[in-house]
Image (cartoon, grey):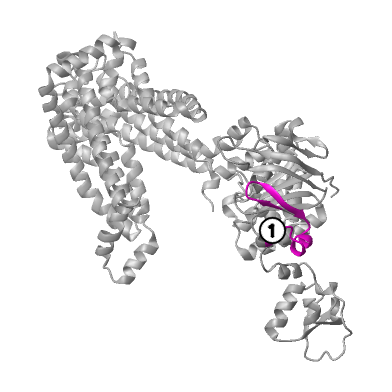
Amino acid sequence: MLASLFVETFQFIGDNASLLLQKAAETAELAFTALGISILLALPLGLWLGHRHRGLFLTLGISSVGRALPSVAIIGFLIAWLGVGFWSNTIALVVLGIPPILTNTYFAVEGVDRDVVEAARGMGLTEVQILARVELPLGLPFVLAGIRISAVFVIATATIAGLFGGGGLGDIMANQAAYGLAGVLAAALCVSALALLTAGVLALARDAAFHKMAPSA
Amino acid sequence: MTGFRVADGGPVIPNFGHGSACLKNNGWFCPEWVREHWGDILQPALVQHIELTVIAVSIGFGIAFVLALVGFRFRLFNAPLGAFTDLLYAIPSIALFQLLVPFTGLTVTTIEVALVSYTLFVFYRNIVEGLRSVPDEVLESARGMGLTRRQTFWRVELPLAVPAILAGVRVATVSTISIATVAAFLLYYGLGGPIFDALAQPDIFRTELVAAGGLAILLALTADTLLALAQRSLTPWNRLG
Amino acid sequence: MPTEAAELVFDEATKVYPGRDGAAVDHLSLTVPAGEICVLVGPSGGGKTTALKLVNRLIPLTSGDIRIDGRSILDLDVTELRRSIGYVIQQVGLFPHVTVEANIGTVPKLLGRPRSWIKARSAELLALVGLDPSYAKRFPAQLSGGERQRVGLARALAANPALMLMDEPFGAIDPIVRTRLQDEFLRLQHELRKTVVFVTHDVDEAIKVGDRIAILREGGRLAQYDTPKQILEHPVDEFVADFVGRDRALKALSLRTLGDLELSPAIEVDGLLQLPAETSQRDALAMLVAERSEAVLVVGAGGSPLGVATREDLLK
């Protein structure tokens, strides 16, 4: 039975490639918009707090709270507040996507060897220059890891938005009546593929960052 | 609400049926509704949700522990077991629930099986990493002193892996609570039930949403805090030095 | 504390790793008399740590035998063997998740001793290694490197083993603390008289600590096995001479004190440097050179003059 399901799933993909691609694009649009906003909000905050070595409790608090928030509840609240639509889903995903980025960025910058920072300060670099030229480059791998974690989580959660009219691959997954179980699985495969692809790109970016740091490695 | 499958068996809450001003205006939180329906909607949902979580985390931990022992003891199996649990986690919850229905029906068991498989990913990694993190010199001195392999495992390796294991329990619990709310799209069970119900109304029933959603959030935060405290109290040696 | 120290015999003990050229330990034969400290020393690759680990079977023998009080280690159950030997390693390896007291009590607990016995024994050992009894309830993370090493030593002594194996125990400690630990260890050994096999790469430590020194050359072959004095004064070949260093004559002086010399009568002692009789001849010579003096007044306990030692006396 599983075998035939397997076959049907791939048949579905073959037959509905353009549909899947279109839906995938919708999910990607939602996820990446949310991810982009999360980065815009969390990255500077994490960089600044980490540089000043302040706000550890705040960051840890946001991190554990953010990790704990049930996604359905958040999406639900936003839909009730803003109505069904792109922005309610996006804002929900932003809320859920910020914590990993904030946490990793904070610790990436905060953990840079203090001697190096002090040397830079002694040489006359301004605080902003230290952040930009010393701390961020050295902390980049860890920062990228945080973005990767957030990306995978946001992509997976974006599909839940499909339950609430968010479109995208979640739309297909929530509609077994229309697309059949094979369709559901096909959409699921696409989600995994999208997540893996994104994670892969970010992993490559992280490796590139590592190589810049230690070219001999 | 396109594409939304209304779950079976849930009570339909008539909106504004009570006539109070708050409810008539679909207020965000009407205490009288909450009080009245605590017993028949909210509390059972909360209890079901806790039940789902506890069962899933316990069973998941048990299975993962056995798998981790195998993966830890026999290096060869570690990569495949890790890949297997990774794969389980990668399947979106909505899809996994539906995939299981032909096998276990539209029942609570289906939800539990899915929840368990998601916890395996978190637990397996944490337990193996925790066991691996024991410093070499501690193991060497244990062996040199005459502890048998089994004694070394139970008295040294496992206790030292506890922090990582507890961290895993914390993450697994919290994510299970979250995924369990999604389950309601399949079956009216747990706090997801009232949430989906409220969202399904033509005019979203705010009080029910806030009440059930708020309970879900509170449950998750409480569990997280309690487990964090447990982690601190069970590892006194980590707090010092 | 009455102890029955054991005699340890290496009998053509050999360890060969498959796929590697040459032996790690090559037909090592030596006898460590009961109650003595035998130091295994040599360049890296000389097999000293391997030889040590052959004794408690952390590394299995390829051929040959090792006997403790006449009994071959191969005849004994490996777990029982290890529990009867005190094992101390460089990074100590204290269990971080239990208290100092529980660490010390590890082997006694395995042997079935009750909690009360362990508590008492732990307090006894802490005093022995020079730590305050309040340390019993602390965790390893709260201790300094030197303190951890002492606890490691106490832990190895807990079951009153007849034999102790120590693998560069003071290697990771800073020099000042290391000297102190060496002195205290020697004081302890004076009291306990255990049989000890001690591995180090530091020749000076070997000379200071060892009753007998075994120098292993690369390939795990025994170059010379003798008392420090003999090795310094009569190195058996070029390798040993090089290994102990060109300053071996000076090193030999560190083995003797002013009290060992034949002193001249104490006349015309004004302005002479005064040194206690326990001062090593090497330190005395160093001070004479620094002060550009010719002689030193040797004093006994309480400051009573014992005699005069000249530079020539020391250089003889």
Image point (75%, 60%), residue name: C231
Q: Is residue C300 visible?
A: yes
**Residue sitting nearer the eye, C216 or C295:** C216
Residue B165: x and y, percent? 47, 35
What's the residue at 25%, 50% (across, down)?
A43
- View extreme (front): residue: C238
Look at label 1 and name its amino acid. Answer: Val
Above or below, C42 relative to C7: below
Query: Going by the image, does B1 lie left or right of C8?
Result: left
Could you say which quadrant of the image residue C76 lies in? Answer: top right
Q: Is residue B31 visible?
A: no
| Foreground pick, C128 / C83 | C83
Q: Residue at x 39, y 64 (%)?
A: A115
Q: Position of residue C265 (x, y in %)?
A: 89, 85
The subunit carrying tag 1 is C
State the residue in front, C135 or C311.
Answer: C311
Is C240 included in the stretch rendered in magenta?
Answer: yes
Is residue A154 highlighted in magenta? Answer: no
List x then y, in percent, for residue A84: 13, 31
- How many residues crowd around disc 1 within 10 Å: few (fewer than 14), some, or many (20 or more)? some
Question: Is residue A57 left or right of A155 when viewed as pictured?
Answer: right
Secondary structure beneath disc 1? Answer: helix
Range shown magenta: C215-241
Please give the residue where the numbered disc 1 appears in the rendered image.
C240
